[in-house]
Amino acid sequence: MKALDEAVAEDRVAVEAGGRAPDEVLAVLRRFWGFESLRPLQLEAIQAGLERRDSLVVMPTGGGKSLCYQVPPAVAGRTDVVVSPLIALMKDQVDALRLSGYPAAALHSGMDQMEVRDVEREVAGGRHHLIFVAPERLLTPRFLELAARLKVTSFAIDEAHCISQWGHDFRPEYRRLAELKTRFPGASIHAYTATATARVRTDIVEQLGLTEPAVLVGSFDRPNLLYRVRPKLDVNTQIAETIRRHKGEAAIVYSISRKDTEHIAAYLASQGVRAAAYHAGMEADERRRTQDRFAAEEIDVVVATVAFGMGIDRSDIRCVIHAALPKSIEAYQQETGRAGRDGLPAECVLFYSAADVMRWRNLMERSAAESATPAEVLESSKQLLEEMRRFATVVRCRHAGLSAYFGETYQNANCGACDFCLGEVEGVADSTVLAQKVLSCVARVEQRFGVEHVVDVLSGASSERVRRLSHEKLSTYGILKDLPRKTLTNIVYQLVDAGLLERTPGDRPTLKLNSLSWEVMRGRRAVTLLQAKESKSKRTRIEEASWRDVDEVLFESLRKLRREIAAERGMPAYVIMHDATLRELASVRPTTMEALGGIRGMGEKKLADLGARVLECIKAHH
């Protein structure tokens, strides 16, 4: 097989060259989705599907991966199979496709036997272009027999990074998908993922046994996302302040533990925010209820564990907050990728503390010990965590940093969409002196204590432990009492991150000095501590541009109409119409069916089905 990097280079040239989509492809686009054009990477991926050539397509979340496997069977008049790991995503995709007039179905464990038989009968009769299945159902004798009877010639594997142990979301059941090549030797396999480093891409190709695949790697950059990294101080208050910037809009907050999600959700609710927790420890019905309420826009914020796949496919999420550090850049890219899937600006805020790094390491080691995880897999997980820590602590353009991690060169000198490029980060006054005081305190307590006790001494706390050890008599006692405790803790962790102070591993970590610590204390090394600038909340240039010429009052009226239609049909609101379509409607303000048909996202069936009500809403606003 051709070397993977050569295949990527060759196919990148083809993608960049682009080309006009064939007439039959454009006809399908107009009919079902109301689109007049494709992005270059979509065109190449669709061509691979039509030619039944194996492919690996890496495209950022919101980049339009779904169209790449939805268009070929509609053009060719065949039935293809899509492997998807989450029931909720399958259901949403099928609902959205059917609303557009596209025949599709799903088979999953949430259906009763009668529903399963009905769908199997429809599929066997050739009534659907796509059938969605989970990987474990795909390889059951019953489904394999159905696929053989249908003479399926193409399989699309969504979230294909799940097959690689080097990816951030390895799922053992995905490994069995390699059997497809044996059971269906004439069929093509098309792997899709939003996040895959070169190593993961190679592993996907090898694990699936792809033959001379078209390897199509798009840009990993999401220019519509605004990335901010803030030191974690009073995280509940910080999250609430961020949510206020997006009042009435959809947001997701990620945290590490189930308990954290519940505490954060309860705090937000106490602040008048429509929020709910979502984690694997909840009853399935309760999780589903939270998910349905979020989809129906009855709540605005879901607080979820980072380790649990939510299956939320909302296109209009305007904010993703990480209350704790994700365990890898791939996970961060995937989770922040849930924001702005409609291409409109969205904000992604990470509240960082080095304590979260230690927490993840302990969790990884405990989990590895309990499950007999191979040493190399544990080490790989730790390396991924270290890359994530570096992203959070190295102050540079965030878009450039993410692009570099995925092997892409970022072309812009200033992205205009991250804390660094917007000038929102500044140095702390007298950083070196502050560092010397902290390090001196570690020395005075004889390097025998952890962060909490060192902060107690620096802040002049009158705790029983401080008095018992007579640490109130130390020269460093109360030396930084004018600084808030959260700020002091953050300074200590910044020194740990910079390698100027060490923290031992284990359940009771202590702070230790190293050679760099002594250089700082002796005045031979300068230190730069960072903090977020105080600034009034306002829209960035990118956000302002997205609202230009949009009648915001009409936009809200259209959102209300969308909610009404969704409630009538028992569907998520975002399945009815994307925010991007609503904003275009509120900008163009069409008053005839012909003009409405020119709006992106208004396909033939949607126009006939919803057009009159949309026009009525627009006319009522004039």
Image (cartoon, helix red, strand yellow):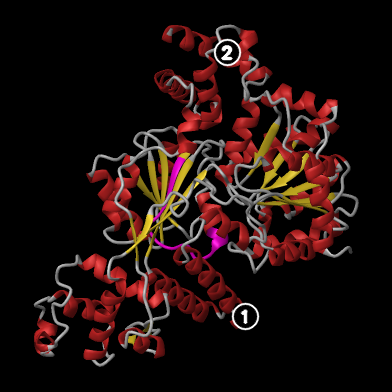
Which quadrant of the figure has residue 73? top right
Label 1: which residue?
376
x%, y% of residue 128? Answer: 75, 32
x%, y% of residue 442? Answer: 26, 86
Quick one: label 1, few (<14), some, or many (20+) residues within 10 Å?
few
- Is 272 situated left or right of 42 in this image? left
Q: Nearer the viewer, residue 116 or 65?
A: 65
* Residue drawn 62% across the image and 8% down it: 593
Quick one: label 2, few (<14), some, or many (20+) residues within 10 Å?
some
* Residue drawn 62% across the image and 80% down it: 376
| Residue span colored magenta | 318-331
x%, y% of residue 531? Answer: 33, 61
Q: Which of 478 and 384 is in front in this view?
A: 478
- At label 1, which amino acid type do we have? Glu
- Is 569 situated left or right of 498 in this image? right
* Residue drawn 64% across the image and 68% down it: 166
Q: Earlier in the sequence, mark 2 or mark 1?
A: 1
Q: In this view, does 178 lie above or below 354?
A: above
Circle 2: element type? helix
- At label 2, which amino acid type do we have? Gly
Q: Which mark is residue 611?
A: 2
x%, y% of residue 269? Answer: 27, 44
Q: Residue furthest bottom?
A: 446
- Is 180 situated left or right of 410 in this image? right
- Is 54 situated left or right of 366 in this image? right
Residue 510 seen: no
Q: Which of 611 and 137 is in front in this view?
A: 611
Residue 242 seen: yes
Q: In which quarter of the image is the C terminus?
A: top left
Instruction: Determine the CA span between mark 2 and mark 1.
Output: 57 Å
Q: Indicate yes or no whether the magenta region holds residue 320.
A: yes
